[in-house]
Structure formats: structure tokens, C-alpha cells
Amino acid sequence: MTGEENAQRMEKIVSLCKRRGFIFQSSEVYGGLNGVWDYGPLGVELKNNLKQYWWQVTVRERDDVVGLDGAILTHPAVLKASGHVDTFTDPMVDCRTCKTRLRADQLAEKKGIKQCPNCGGKDLTEARPFNLMFQTQMGASADPASIAYLRPETAQSIFVQFKNVLDVSRKKLPFGIAQIGKAFRNEINPRNFTFRSREFEQMELEYFCRPEQGMDLLAYWLKERIKFYEEIGISRKRLHILDVPEKERAFYSKGTFDIEYEFPFGRQELEGVAYRTDFDLQQHIKASGKALDYFDEETKERFVPHVVEPSAGVDRTVLALICDAYDEDSAPDEKGKMETRIVMRFHPRMAPVKCAIFPLLRNKEPLVAKAREVQALLRPHMNVFYDEGGAIGRRYRRQDEIGTPFGITIDFETLGEKGQELRDTVTLRDRDSMKQERVAIKDLPQLVSSKIR
Ligand code: GAP
């Protein structure tokens, strides 16, 4: 695809997200809050499906990982020890001509001279470090002792609670602590839709181990995480692994891989998988004076565990799911004429709505009653949507556009009007092939459930 085609594709995706209720600009009626997004009725379902599946495979299906839900408001001492207060910065430059604040690494350059990418101005200030954390005040007094931060990553509460979790869970190394939650960064240039936001969610795992296990576990978790993206339906050919060179890694990391996705706006990071050594625990030991170490019952050794961290962005993965799913093909309209069909090819596991239920006609009471029965039958098992408005082809099209993998139509056969053998059967339509099969209503919960797990 050319750059222009990619830009058009992205425009269509952003417009569909708003039109169908995946993602809205936050505070839109007041002109919007830059870098902050609200998830609509479909967006929240998609996001929840992603988070639940991550939790399922990372925590519930494993004996060696437990969960945590830490607070967002964070003690400044935690973020001082972690290095965030002093070094979590981006170099920033002000353009004196158009008064824009820019990231120093995003300046334009012409004939070796740095320029403002907005106005072309060359009157720029020197680069200054700009801390990305959101600071707030706890309580009524405004003195420096009341400063707290909105966490810039979920990881730190895991490190700080390491000993408590270890004691209550009685886990042996290697074991992990997982967390999903909000993080906040005052990004200088939020951009590319939700890709770089100021408020976002992370899915992080801190997997603690013996020092000699670190490099092998880094390779293990990279493989696991690639498998995860494939399992949620992201095509492998659009995923890339970047082995981050030593000079670009954090100084304490012995190995870092970025998992990148080919977004329409370029190849960008979805997740970092990093071997962070014992840096974080050591920092908190030094700063707090508390023993955040591990005692090995078998070898009688006491040591500070090392950690491998797969750290993924919820919002970036949702955006990758949406970009990967977006497709256009052609399908016949009501009169059999071919028209362009927009279809979101979500993996059924991720699809916000699993099954749409349609009575063939809205003004035939027995069809409507039967359709409501089918809705009640499936509802305890999955998110379903009932729709009786408009021609059936239009209704299919509306569901294709939001990626609903299955459509169930209740017709006159269902009522037994075309032979008793078809009574209480419905058509089950597949979104991708558009093929329909006839299925007994009583088999639907098991049949559809097996396709969406
Ligand atoms: N604990 C390690 C850590 O936070 P990071 O690479 O800064 O590492 C991890 O962040 C992931 O969080 C990124 O790979 C990305 O998916 C997500 N993320 C980071 N900043 C983001 C932002 N401004 N908007 C959306 N997602 C972001």
C-alpha cells in the first residue's frame, strides 16, 4: 500500500470507530481533551474481551502467576526510587514563532538546520527535559509533602508489593505477578489516534526468577507473547520483533525485544519484553531499607530475584485489533447488485458482539417471539444483539461492519410453516464466508460457544 492509501485506510478506521461506537474523543462536546479517549459500547466490549483473555492465559491458566490490582495514586518515594522522578523525561523544544512545544526528536530538518514541523520556524529554544508524569496533590494542604503521582506504569506497585505477594501466595521461583490497569503519561505529542495517549491501560507481568534463568525466560516470554497475539487474531505477518540494541536499552536491561505491529501509520511498538535484571527490587531495597529478597528453602540461599517483564498496552492492542480486522470486500445488495461491504474480521474470541439475532419480519408476532426466545437462550453464554429493523441484508451489513461473527435468522421454517422437520431450526450465517447453515435452536448455545472460545 502507498502512504496515501494507508492514510485513507486510517481515516476510514477512525471514522468507523466513531460512527459505530468503538472510540470517541474524550470531552468532545467541549472541543476534546487532547490525547484522551472514551470507549463506546462496542469499544468497551472489545477492550474487555482483550483484557479478560490476557488475564485468562497469563494468570488463571498458570500455576506460577498471581494477580494484583495496585493503586493509581503513587507515593513519590516509589517513583523517586524507580528513577521516574529524575529521568522519566522527553527532551522538549519550544518554537518561538508559533509557540508550539515539540519533542526534540520530532523536529524537521532541512539542509542540516532544525525546523519547527508546524510552521517551519527556525527560532527554537534549547532542548530541556520535560517530566512525563502527572503530579497531583493529596489532601487539603499544598505543601511539597502532599505531592503524589498518577502512576506512569503499573509495574512499580508490583515491585513494591513483591514481598507481601510472595508471603501470601507462597510461590517458589520462578513466579510472576500480573496486573492490568491505567497508566498516565503527559506525552508532549499525543498522536496516531489512540496509539500515543496521555491516559492508557497496560497489561504487565513481572516474572521473578533466579539470575541464571533470566535470558532463557526472556526468550520464553517473547514466544508466549507472540503466540498470544496470534491467538487474538492478529496476523503474524504484520507482527515484527525488534531485538533492541544494547545502546538503546535501559542501562540495567540485559536484553529487550519490542513486539511491533504494522499500523497504517507505520511499524510501531505494541509491547516490550525486557529482562530488567534485579534493578527495580534493588532500587526499592536501597530506598526503603526493607528486605525485598527471596529465601530458597532448598539451597538455603537468600538473594534478590531478577525479573523478566512482558509489558503490553491495552489501547495499542485494541487499535491493532481494529486495524487488522478492517476489510472491504463485495457482497450483493437487496437487488442482487454487488456493493462494497465493510467487514471487521475480528477473531470471534475478540468480537464485541458474538451473535446477532434477527426475526425475518418485525410485524409477525410469532417470529419476534421466537427471536426473543433465542436471545434469552444465548444471553447467559455470550454478548448477543437483537435487531428487527430494516431488510435482512441491511441488518447483516450492519453486523459485518462491527465484526459480529454469527447471524441467526428466525424465519417461517422456524415456525414449522414449511414442514415439521424444520420447526425450531434457524439459519446461522457466517460473517466471513456469508454462508448459511440450518441449525436446531437447542444446539445453538453449545455450537456458537465452541466457536467463540
Ligand atoms: N513497565 C515498562 C513500561 O511501562 P513502556 O515501553 O514504557 O514500558 C509498555 O510501556 C507499553 O505500554 C508499550 O509497549 C505500549 O504498548 C504502552 N504504552 C506506553 N506509552 C503509551 C502511550 N502514551 N499511549 C498508549 N500506550 C502506551
Image (cartoon, grey):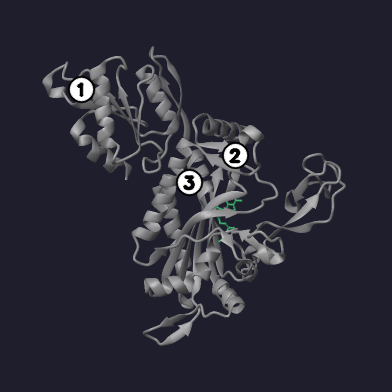
Residue linked to disc 2 = 26
Q: Looking at the image, do the residues carrying marks 2 and 1 touch, with CB atoms under 8 Å apart?
A: no
Q: Is residue 275 visible?
A: yes
Q: On screen, 315 above or below 400?
A: below
Mark 1 element type: loop
Residue linked to disc 3 = 237
Mark 2 or mark 3, whichever is nearer to me: 2
Q: On screen, 32 above or below 261?
A: above
Give amino acid for label 3.
Lys
Tell me: 256 left or right of 88: left
Mark 3 element type: helix
Ligand 1: image quarter:
bottom right
Mark 2 element type: loop
Q: As drawn, which residue projects farthest toward the front? A: 140
Residue at 61%, 38% in the rendered image: 27
Residue at 57%, 78% in the rendered image: 285
> Which numbered tag is attached to residue 403?
none
* Ligand 1 lies under 8 Å from the Cβ of mark 3: no
Q: Quadrant of residue 359?
A: top left
- The CA distance from mark 2 to mark 1 is 45 Å
Tell me: 418 left or right of 111: left
Position in image of residue 98 (x %, y %): 83, 41
In-front residue for pair 306/326: 306
Give amino acid for label 1.
Thr
In-front residue for pair 254/306: 306
Tell me: 395 left or right of 442: right
Lower sequence index among marks 2 and 1 = 2
Residue linked to disc 1 = 414
Residue at 47%, 74% in the rendered image: 163
Crowd band around label 2 with a 10 angstrom C-alpha radius: few (<14), some (14–19), many (20+)? some
